[in-house]
Image: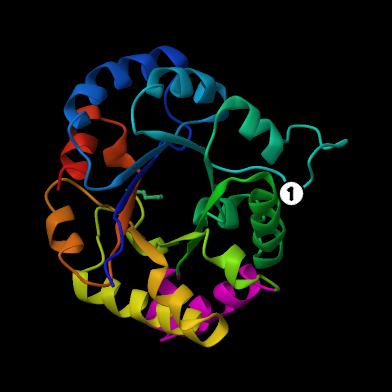
Amino acid sequence: MSRRPVIAGNWKMYKTRADTRQFFETFKPLVAASRHCDITIAPPFTALSTAVDAAAGTVITIAAQNAHWEPEGAFTGEVSMPMLVETGCRGVIIGHSERRQYFGETDESVNRKLKAALQAGLTPIVCVGELAAERDANLTQAVLRRQFEGGFAALTDVEFSRILLAYEPVWAIGTGRTATPEIATSAHGFLRELARKRFSPECASALRILYGGSVKPDNIKGLMAQEEIDGALVGGASLDAKSFAAIVNF
Ligand code: PGA
């Protein structure tokens, strides 16, 4: 089954609105002819509307990096899924390891956010991945299973078919230590197997699984050559327009 590749950029807490305008000025011409994959960029909240305006009329879609599960309420400092939709966002990253590590995100909150994103019509990019200590202790599959089952609890096939899954081994994020294509392939295969057990075979084989963790222009080709790798979630290398364009045009 051939799955359409997705290249997504996660800007984390980088870039002002002015930086965002500048990025798109350089980036747009470099990907103007790129029709082989979906391109999405996740700026910080404050730059979302700037990015939406800058991407208007292109195939680039804009996603947020997080949101609350309630549509509104007394939750100081939070932003809701319908607010993202109104801003022109089409997707939202959920359960990134930095949110799990530093902001108390759990499989249960991932599940609530995922349902809220689907309800609002956003494409969720759900992140899973093991810590270095978990890999060393041979717990990778156990961790992925727990995150998968908890995050996707009580989801229907139709809902599951709208999700993008990102495998991001925590030891590879921002470390320059990319998973080898073999390590990524084996984790992706395991995740697809979990999907096959829990959802329909059609859903499982259509699921797009992105790899994330130190993806760079010089390793994207080797990763994308793997049958099981359907795209990339790129942090550091998505901040520079030329380097992110080189990744998009792998
Ligand atoms: P990195 O980040 O590409 O800088 O390793 C990836 C991510 O956190 O999504």
Residue at x 67% of width, y 73% of height:
153
Q: Tell me which segment is drawn in magenta.
A: 130-153
Residue at x 57% of width, y 83% of height:
198
In the image, is residue 226 above or below residue 89?
A: below
Task: Find residue 154 and report its image quarter.
Answer: bottom right
Which element type, helix, strand or loop, lies under badge 1? loop
Give, as a three-letter code, the residue at label 1. Answer: Trp
Whether residue 79 is visible, yes or no, is no
Spot occupied by residue 179 in the image (x, y as percentages of width and height): 26, 66
Spot occupied by residue 49 in the image (x, y as percentages of width and height): 53, 21
Residue at the spot of label 1: 69
Any magenta on residue 213? no
Residue at x 74% of width, y 49% of height:
69
Label 1 neighbourhood size at 10 Å, few (<14), some (14-19), many (20+)? many
Screen quadrant of the N terminus: bottom left
Which is the main secondary structure of the residues drawn in magenta? Answer: helix
Spot occupied by residue 209 in the image (x, y as percentages of width and height): 38, 64
Q: Nearer the viewer, residue 236 or 50?
A: 50
